Image (spheres, rainbow, N blue to C red):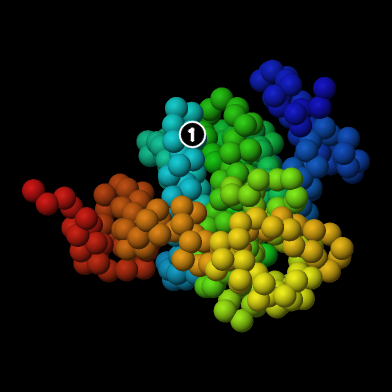
Amino acid sequence: MPFSSPTLTTEPQRLAAIEQARQAVLLARSSSHGASGLAAGIERSWRRCLALGHEPHRPVTFNAVSAQNTRRVIDASRPLLLAAAPVVRTLTRAMLHTRYFAILTNPDGVVIDVHGPVDRNDPPAATLARVGIDLSEAAVGTTAIGTTLAEQQSVWLHRGEHFFQDNAVFSCAGAPILGPDGRCVGMLDLTGVNVVEQPALKHLVTQSARSIENALTLAQPHRLLLRLNWPGRVLGDDNDGLVCLDADGFITGMNRPAIEMLCATPDTMSAHADSVFAIGCAELFDAASQHRGAFEVPLWSGLRLLALAQPHTTATKGHGMSGHAMPLKDHETSLIRKAVEDAQGNVEVAARALGISRATVYRRLQSKKPVA
């Protein structure tokens, strides 16, 4: 029975099948692709690691990028951090009693946020769950983070499916996050240490990544939002295609479902609506101002989509960032608190890791103390 379907096997069967695959691919160096029973993406990751010269029994070092690079990564990732904050808070409730926690990375695999019950007394957890750590495939081998970013698809890894033997204590799910221009801006990872396998987390992390993508799209400057789906579907949830238009009718962003429905190319991502929809742009704006409701719009391909046109004032109500996302100042304070925790209370070490002064650390922490 293939162990790529973990819900159909027992834990001993899973671990035995994983060990057989390790013997075949990592030790015997079998060149027969697909014969190991591994999920194809995991096997490709193993082989990439071997090509990089990694050895599965070599100790793994979880290294942080420089303080300067950490600052640069955090600054570049601010839109992602803002979009992800309310989503991550919600998904950690779904994992409340599982001992899994969430990690958010940039597109290079550098950790930009950690959320959830991290046991700082557990060395593997405390070492992994730190802002600024490089968890790319090149740095730490096959993990949900590295494999997700390399394969650009959701993955689930359990124990020995990680390339390095040292990482066999982890179980993790990962999903890529695409920005409004269709390019990967990072990934979301759910990890547990010496925990019961939870393959359902692959679905949770995938859905959560889609919610983050939608928030990133809705945060784009726009005057009109088009919600799209196929005729017969009901509009109004995270499965809608989202297309943002500026006042002149040019596309300022779209989410993954919209990219797939419209077969969008890089050129399409910033094109005028008239080149995508076989209907005048003015009619789309009129539909929004008249609160027309859902209607069918033709595409130049001959296909038709169900559309709901919403002006910006109502387009993001209940779905955007306002009133839901953590303010950026609060998020930065949260990162500082995590750095201090990682440094076991040593403010000087935390400040050095973040590339800021001790005075800044003290000031930001003091500013969040409750008033007596």
Q: Please say if 334 is above or below 244.
A: above
Q: Residue 147, image x and y in percent? A: 68, 49
Q: Please say if 240 is above or below 250.
A: above
Q: Is residue 182 left or right of residue 82?
A: right
Q: Residue 53, image x and y in percent? A: 73, 53
Q: Is residue 178 visible?
A: no
Name the residue rendered at 48%, 61% in the picture: 314
User: In this view of the protein, which residue sits in the foreground, 210 or 344?
Assistant: 210
The residue that disc 1 covers is 94
Q: Could you say which quadrant of the image residue 23 lies in? A: top right
Q: Residue 270, image x and y in percent? A: 68, 76
Q: Could you say which quadrant of the image residue 267 lies in? A: bottom right
Name the residue rendered at 18%, 58% in the picture: 366
Provide the secondary structure element on which disc 1 rests.
helix
Name the residue rendered at 65%, 55% in the picture: 294
Q: Could you say which quadrant of the image residue 186 lies in? A: bottom right
User: In this view of the protein, which residue sits in the foreground, 343 or 188?
Assistant: 188
Q: Is residue 151 left or right of residue 164?
A: right
User: In this view of the protein, which residue sits in the foreground, 212 or 163?
Assistant: 212
Q: Residue 10, image x and y in percent? A: 69, 18
Q: Please say if 149 is above or below 13.
A: below
**Quarter of the image with the N terminus in it:** top right
Q: Is residue 187 left or right of residue 336?
A: right
Query: In the orientation shown, which residue stands out farthest toward the left?
Result: 372
